[in-house]
Image (tube, rainbow, N blue to C red):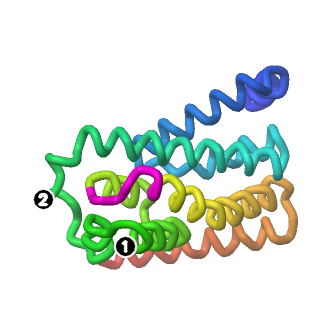
Amino acid sequence: MQEWVVGIFEQYREAAVLVIVLLNVAISILGVVPSVFLTAANIVVFGPVGGTAISALGEAAGAAVSFFLYRKGFKRWVQTKLPDSRWAETLLTARGKEAFLLIIGLRVLPFVPSGLVTFAAAIGSVGAITFIAASTIGKIPALLIEAYSVYQVTEWTVQGKLFLIVFSIIVIYLGFKKNRK
């Protein structure tokens, strides 16, 4: 099945890029689905540079579309529903340079949910251009790390094997830690 999909994407490259960007938009709207699998597919089909560029385009488009949808649909309703978090409260009231730098910082941090950052910015005071620019800039370092890791794993290099070992140890540790509670 995977070979068939890769073959279709390679034969219809332009259509594949559009489909990938639309999938990134859907993932961003959902807000909880990781995009690492889509990045992996992009790298397999388009290579490390092309795949990373397409992933960046898709993630930027996804963040922008999500921002506008969240702003239109949730701004009035959600003021009381946002999790109690200092960064979320700060982002709700941030404007201009402060909002720009805060969004970049939150996008770079791998443990801050991307969907929640988009959601908080959309219902807050952040302007659309500020959000889109900061979000795109902030996603680049995280996407480069993700793309590098995916490439190393798919090529089965020493770094890829080490990445998988460390990742597995972390998952096992967190699983045991959760079961103890």
Q: Amino acid at mark 2?
A: Thr
Q: Nearer the viewer, residue 156 or 18?
A: 18
Write down the region rendered in magenta: 124-131
Q: Nearer the viewer, residue 32 or 19?
A: 19
Q: Nearer the viewer, mark 2 or mark 1?
A: 2
> On the image, numbered disc 1 is attached to which residue?
178
Q: Secondary structure at mark 1?
A: helix
Magenta stretch holds residue 125:
yes
> On the image, numbered disc 2 is attached to which residue?
80
Quadrant of the rendered structure where residue 179 is?
Answer: bottom left
Q: Residue at x 56, y 65 (%)?
A: 138
Q: Position of residue 13 (x, y in %)?
A: 79, 27
Q: Earlier in the sequence, mark 2 or mark 1?
A: 2
Q: Amino acid at mark 1?
A: Lys
Q: Position of residue 85 (x, y in %)?
A: 26, 73
Magenta stretch holds residue 32:
no
